[in-house]
Image (cartoon, rainbow, N blue to C red):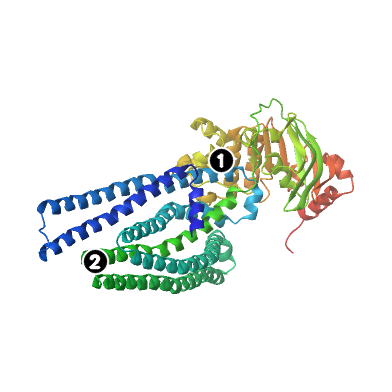
Amino acid sequence: MFTMIKRIVDWTGSYKKRFYWGIVWSLLENFFIAFPLMGAAYVLNLMLQDTAGLRSLHTKEALWALLFMVFCVLGRFFFSYLRAVFQESIAYEKTAEERIEIGDILKRVSLGFFDRHKTGDIAGAVTTDLSALELYAMKMTDTVIGAYLQTLAMILSILFFSWKVATVALVGVLCSAFFQRRLVKDSRKNTAVRQKANDSMINATLQFIRGITVIKSYGRTGSAVAELQKSFSDQRDINIKIENDYMWTNGLYQLSLKLTSVAIAFMVCLQTIHGEISLPIMLMIVIFSFVMFARLETVTTASHTLEMMRAALDKLQTIKTANYIDEDSKDIVLNNFDISYQNVSFAYDHKNVIENVSFSLPENSTLAIVGPSGSGKTTLCNLLARFYDVNHGSISIDGHDIREMTCDTLLQYISIVFQHVYLFHDTILNNIRFGRPEASIEEIKEAAKKAACHEFIENLPNGYNTMLGEGGSTLSGGEKQRLSIARAILKDAPIVILDEATASVDPENEHLIQQAISALVKGKTLIVIAHRLNTIQFADNILVIDQGKLVQQGTHEQLIEEEGIYKDFQKILNRTSNWQLS
């Protein structure tokens, strides 16, 4: 448990000094909890002496005792306020910084990180886990530390009157610590299981929502819901088992504290009978024991919650220690947009994806890349955009290795039109000007006209202010593709990467998209990932990639005369063009 507290303290980073000051104020606060009881015992002792005729109780003495107790109450309030000011805002300030830091890290990691980690796990770390730290990290830490500081203050106060009772209290606390340690050990083991079940539930829910169209179209709603319900049931069963284990160990912990309270009461009664301590002191010590152990009883819940924080910190650490694109580079101004790949190799998860590829692309020329599915075509373009960094070799623009440039600087010169378009849950206006936030309405409309999407936008009820569903779900595939091209036209970058945009659209949209592409690529350095050979015959150079290797290179006319993959593709294209239902 204290290992976990140390980890949370380390997590606070620059706020650590404030945290330690909070502990000082908490210690003083807990002493001021004990002092009023001592004052009350003093007054009660005077009253008993007055009743027994041993001495007279003076009003002045009672008044001073009352003022002392008022001072203690005010002192407790003051130090409680200081503790809250120094400690309680730490978690909120730290988690705000963490979210910004993680956002920056996710911006800089390679795309491989997102391939290796499920979306639900990443989203859960940034939302659920950080929210848990925000709400509970400081509160639970304060509960545990405060409880033990109060116990220390109470035992020291009891020691002032009876070392025997103080010893019994200390032994009881140490015995309860044994069960507390066992509880923490069980919580640590169970938290990982609970976290895994929770992540599985989140991922199952996301998969169900995202795949609902496919699920319905195949009539698998029942089985899909059953799988989703199973993830809910698994989480429920795990939580019930964990809580049952917790209740058993927690019961033993609570029992040890109750028995210690009984032992203290018995001890002080014996000492009172033998005249070792007075009746008021006896009452004060009994009250001390109940106050002390009532606070200790809250420690199990707090420590159980703290162990849940361990899994949250582990997930955050996974993100924070991820390998990200090195951006210790310069803001370079490019004057020419010749592109050169020199002996480029790239491996993903120890599997070679690109092997020793070299080629050059002069400024304002067009390069097409063809090859079988999974041959490395898209990866080759992703390397140019620094979505990944090469393992060997280099990629340069205008003679500058792109690793010498920051990603933000590099991507100012590149526009990418993906085959699978993603539009944000925002207005059409903001989606188009995503690459140029400062663009005027007139510039946005001009880009939309060039992309052949102005007309359909104007026909929408709210025009350019129409809100799109997540991922652009309220638009057709062709409409989304044209908006994506409008976005690229508005950005007006000198290098364009085009993942064949007409691969899966109807003839009408294909014609409109080809018009939009013509407007986009005019006067640009263009790289086309080709799925249809008839769309790349105009290219200045065509690369044929197979299993990550460059196996052919040349113009359409040259490659069609060579025996190889490109000629085979052309034969397949000729056969399929005459295909019809029999």
Label 1 SS: loop
Most extreme residue toward the top, as rendered? 335
Label 2 SS: helix
**Between 297 and 137, the one nearer to me in the picture:** 297
**Between 394 and 253, the one nearer to me in the picture:** 253
Residue 466 visible somewhere in the drawing: no
The answer to whether marks 2 and 1 mark residues whose Cβ atoms lie closer than 8 Å is: no
Q: Nearer the viewer, mark 2 or mark 1?
A: 2
Residue drawn at x 70%, y 36% is 403
Task: Tell me: 251 left or right of 117.
Answer: left
Relative to 192, residue 123 above or below? above
Q: Which image quarter: residue 53?
A: bottom left
**Between 351 and 91, the one nearer to me in the picture:** 91
- The residue beneath circle 1 is 453
- Provide residue 342's location: percent of width, then percent of height: 80, 37
Task: Tell me: 125 left or right of 269.
Answer: right
Relative to 119, residue 429 above or below? above
Residue type beneath disc 1? Cys
Task: Tell me: 319 left or right of 248.
Answer: right
Tell me if mark 2 has few (under 14), some (14-19) or many (20+) residues whose alpha carbon lies within 10 angstroms of its own: some
Q: Earlier in the sequence, mark 2 or mark 1?
A: 2
- The residue beneath circle 2 is 283
Can you tell which mark lies on residue 363? none
Quadrant of the frame with the C terminus: bottom right
Residue type beneath disc 2? Leu
- Provide residue 20's location: percent of width, then percent of height: 43, 46
Residue 132 visible somewhere in the drawing: yes
How far separated are the C-alphas under marks 2 and 1? 84 Å
- Provide residue 182's location: percent of width, then percent of height: 50, 68
Residue drawn at x 22%, y 66% is 278
